[in-house]
Amino acid sequence: MGYTIAEKILAEHAGTEVTPGQIVNVPVDMAMANELSAALAIKELNKWGIEKLADPEKVCLIPDHFSPAKDINAAGIAKVVHDFARKHNVKWYLEVGRAGIEHAVIPLEGIILPGQIMIGGDSHTCTAGAVNSFSTGVGSTDIAAAWATGEVWLKVPRSARLIYNGKLRPHVYGKDLILHTLKDLGTAGATYMAIEFQGDVFDQLPIWDRFTMANMAIEAGAKTGLFRFDDKTRELVESTPRYLVDQPEYHVAKPDDNAVYALERVYDVSDIEPQVACPFSPDNVRNISEVKDVKIDQAVIGSCTNGWLEDLRRAAEVFRGRKVADNVRVIILPGSQRIARQAFDEGLPQIFIDAGCIFSTSTCGPCIGGHMGVLGENEVCVSTTNRNFAGRMGHLSSEVYLTNPAVAAASAVLGRIGTPDEV
């Protein structure tokens, strides 16, 4: 029996044959945490009396959830992480102003590479599966154990193969493909599976759409979301700062022709129009033609899901020469400082500001209802983020509709959910 991508990576790290359902102990190539999950992991290490990390070069700490600090308590949490990083000489401690949102920073800097294993104290760690790595979210206790031992135990997941073929319609992107998939699978349809995204549609899309889809694999219950390595992957990986400086070796994980999949789907993307996830679940998805005319108070464009440079370009194309509707506020969140700098080089923030948007710092803030865009009572937001549970972005009575960046921008101009064709 052949191996899937996930099985191949886990078998190589475990040094033994693996089968789905088997528990394996594997070395981690990177153990990442944000300020919230890191603070809890540090507390565990202190409880255990651990004074030395197994390998400080395989630890990554990125404050991004309540950073820049929203209040004194958040500042205190961030300081705990900062002091810990300095004490242990953590190589990949990336401070506010030099990083951004963890799931965008890590692949763009080359911190994780194809064929590697990364665990992270955040459920959307699976984003990095777009570069052919086994990346998954775990609890802070597991993070602490990995920092102390350099290893983690995992159950080998079953794998799902999702194939996307056909020609994309205008204004349909990776976000629409993953929302359409969630409409089909539901939020538990791929529970503890490793999803492999395949198909010729990915020749039509830039690599950034792969990150969007891998990011939301967790919304189907998956352990991780993975893409095959190709020329687009190589171009990205070998242009990252870490690779350009260190030239690290990496090993591509390719699925075997006789690999066994527990779930398979084939989607014809030619039939997919822009998708909208309605309150209060990412799988409550409808075609945009079914949800037009929902009035909005706020639009959020960016985050770890759709804060890539190509996403900002798509939104800017809609905003160019237009104005945000009265009574609508728009917050633009680049995925990282690197992306923000690229956006400035292309003049995108000027377009956003001229349209009446806020071009914000790179932070998770609004996505989790933390700061810089919290929703009030009964307010409605169209957002390019990944979750829309009740109270996710603020008041329990507020509502969040998930869309792609072009649709979110068009909705901001119209003052209601609508399409770029309407503006």
Image (tube, helix red, strand yellow):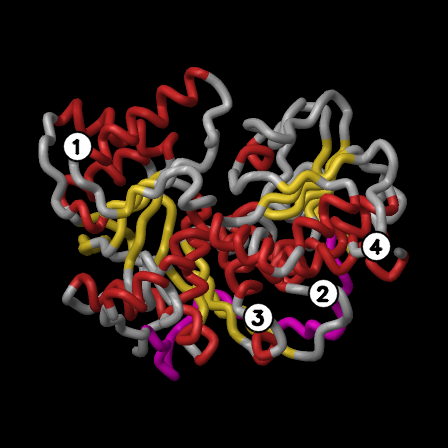
User: Rounded to the nearest whole Å, what is the CA distance between mark 2 and mark 4?
Assistant: 22 Å
Q: Nearer the viewer, residue 110 or 252?
A: 110
Tag in front: 1 or 2:
1
Tell me whether circle 2 and circle 4 mark residues in contact (CB < 8 Å).
no
Residue at point 16%, 37% (across, down): 88
Residue farthest along the top direction in this orientation: 72
Q: Is residue 19 visible?
A: no
Please tell me which of labels 2 and 4 falls first in the chain. Answer: 2
Asked whether, in this view, residue 376 is left or right of residue 35, the answer is: right
Query: What amino acid does circle 1 point to?
Result: Lys
> Over which residues does the magenta segment extend?
253-276
Residue 317 visible in the displayed image: yes
Q: Residue furthest bottom?
A: 257
* Residue that label 1 marks: 87
Q: Nearer the viewer, mark 1 or mark 4?
A: 4
Location of residue 202 with respect to 64 vertically, above or below: below
CA separation in Å, label 3 and label 2: 13 Å
Distance between the alpha carbons at the discs numbered 1 and 4:
50 Å
Quadrant location of the C terminus? Answer: bottom right
User: Residue tagged by mark 3?
Assistant: 206
Whether residue 85 appears in magenta in the rendering, the answer is no
Does the CB distance between marks 1 and 2 fall below 8 Å? no
Of labels 4 and 3, earlier in sequence is 3
> Which callout, 3 or 2, points at the residue further toward the start of the chain?
2
Residue 155, how many percent across, how many down?
A: 29, 53
Report which quarter residue 228 is drawn in.
bottom left
